[in-house]
């Protein structure tokens, strides 16, 4: 493929993936496929993809800084668990074949999609039973961190649609309001990506020219995606998460 065509393809893929990650997640599917199409080997594409997208995730988290401002203390244990999990997941890339998780990933994403879809029903049932459902008071880091640590392992290993899995966990345990959970999702995904990127960089699994292109384009896309997501009605944002989850599951099953 011509070099300039490859660069333009990566710019477009990075911008679109950054925006999608800021809104729902699973932009990895676009950039990973593009890297393969321009000739990057699979393992190097995985490392390059993670490295190229982490600035976009941070940009999306920054767009949600108002929703995160009073939550960082509550999220400190989930952040630490994500850090450790992502390091483990990235190290597994070096040691294990991708097929180890490949058969499980579609079912994981499908389950997470269903969890996001039925969460409003769960909230209504809890309200009928008189359960306290104030999201700020119900935030329980001790319940949340084992789950974010597990997703961190997956995010460090491959990470396709990790945002959807995080949204399922966060809306059930962290905050039923989708916007607040989306803010935490962007922060945790960015932590997982940057930790994995460090491991991949030291392991030699990053094609830096491609990664730099993705860094720049995904940052712009990620910030805009985060801004757009903050303005969406919760029902629309939840619907997009479910729709992308269905598409991601279908793509991974077919592949």
Image (spheres, rainbow, N blue to C red):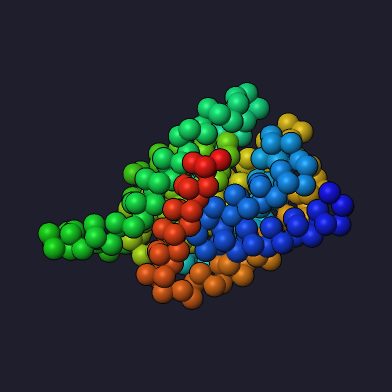
Q: Decide: is 100 above or below 81.
A: above
- The x, y position of residue 36, in whole percent, is 71, 43
* Label tally: 0
Quadrant including the C terminus: top right
Residue in view at x 46 percent, y 41 percent? 106
42 displayed left or right of 255: right
Of 34 and 185, the residue lying toward us: 34
43 displayed left or right of 227: right
Q: Decide: is 195 above or below 183.
A: above
Q: Which residue extends farthest left?
A: 129
Residue in view at x 58 percent, y 36 percent? 157
Q: Which residue extends farthest right?
A: 3
Residue 149 showing in the rendered view: no
- The x, y position of residue 170, in whole percent, is 39, 53
Residue 236 showing in the rendered view: yes
Residue in view at x 45 percent, y 53 percent? 245
208 displayed left or right of 248: right
């Amino acid at each position: 493929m011509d070099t300039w065509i490859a660069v333009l393809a990566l710019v477009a893929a990075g911008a679109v993936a950054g925006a999608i990650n800021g809104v729902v997640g699973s932009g990895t599917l676009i950039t990973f496929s593009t890297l393969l199409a321009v000739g990057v080997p699979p393992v190097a594409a995985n490392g390059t993809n993670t490295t190229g997208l982490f600035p976009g995730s941070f940009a999306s988290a920054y767009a949600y800084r108002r929703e995160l401002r009073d939550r960082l203390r509550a999220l400190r244990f989930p952040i630490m668990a994500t850090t450790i999990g992502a390091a483990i997941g990235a190290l597994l890339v070096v040691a294990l074949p991708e097929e180890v998780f490949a058969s499980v990933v579609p079912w994981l994403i499908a389950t997470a999609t269903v969890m996001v879809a039925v969460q409003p029903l769960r909230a209504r049932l809890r309200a009928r039973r008189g359960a306290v459902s104030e999201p700020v008071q119900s935030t329980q880091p001790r319940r949340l961190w084992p789950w974010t640590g597990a997703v961190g392992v997956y995010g460090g290993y491959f990470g396709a649609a990790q945002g959807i899995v995080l949204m399922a966990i966060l809306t059930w345990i962290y905050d039923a309001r989708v916007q607040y959970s989306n803010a935490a999702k962007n922060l945790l995904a960015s932590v997982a990506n940057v930790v994995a990127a460090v491991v991949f960089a030291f392991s030699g699994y990053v094609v830096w020219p491609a990664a730099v292109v993705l860094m720049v384009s995904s940052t712009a896309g990620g910030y805009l995606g985060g801004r757009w997501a903050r303005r969406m009605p919760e029902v629309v944002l939840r619907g997009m998460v479910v729709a992308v989850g269905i598409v991601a599951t279908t793509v991974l099953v077919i592949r």
